[in-house]
Image (spheres, rainbow, N blue to C red):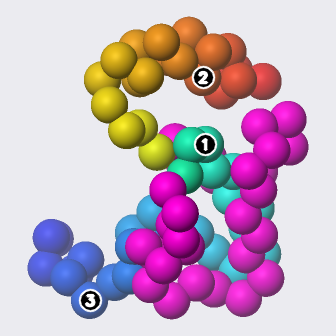
Amino acid sequence: MMSSYGNRTVAQKLGIQAGAIVNVIDPPRNYTSLFGAIPDDVQFEEDEAHRGSITLWFVHDAASYQASLRKRRTLAKH
C-alpha cells in the first residue's frame, strides 16, 4: 500500500482537491512550495475565522503546540 503513495504530491497525500479551501495555521514562509503541484482553484486561507474544508497546523515546537492545543481543539469542534 505504501508504494502507491510514492509518486503522489504532498497535496495529494493530504487530500487537497480542486476547489478546496485550506486553512493554514502558523505556516512557514513559502509554505505552498511544500505541496508540489496544487490542484486548480485551491485557496489557502490564513484567517482562522474562515472555515475551510481542510486545516493544516504547522507546529514549530513542542511548547507552542502545548500552549495552543486547547484553542485548536475548540476551533475543530465548530
60 displayed left or right of 53? left
The quarter in which the N terminus is drawn is: bottom left
Q: Is residue 51 among the parts visible in the rendering?
A: no
Of callouts 2 and 1, the N-terminal one:
1
Distance (Cα) linking label 2 and label 1 = 10 Å
Q: Residue 76: which quarter of the image? A: top right
Q: Magenta segment, which residues?
A: 28-57
Q: CB atoms at circles 2 and 1 under 8 Å apart?
A: yes
Q: Farthest residue in the right direction?
A: 50
Query: What kind of residue is marked 3?
Result: Asn
Residue assigned mark 3 = 7
12 displayed left or right of 47? left
Distance (Cα) linking label 3 and label 1 = 27 Å
What residue is drawn where x is 35% and y is 18%? 63
Residue assigned mark 1 = 25
Along the viewing direction, whichever of 63 and 50 lies nearer the viewer: 63
Q: Is residue 61 among the parts visible in the rendering?
A: yes
What residue is drawn where x is 63% and y is 75%? 17
* Relative vertical location of residue 49 with respect to residue 50 in this rendering, above or below: above
- Element type where label 2 sits in the image: helix
Residue assigned mark 2 = 72
Q: Residue 78: which quarter of the image? A: top right
Label the magenta part by its dominant secondary structure.
loop
Query: What kind of residue is marked 2?
Result: Arg
Along the viewing direction, whichever of 73 and 63 lies nearer the viewer: 63
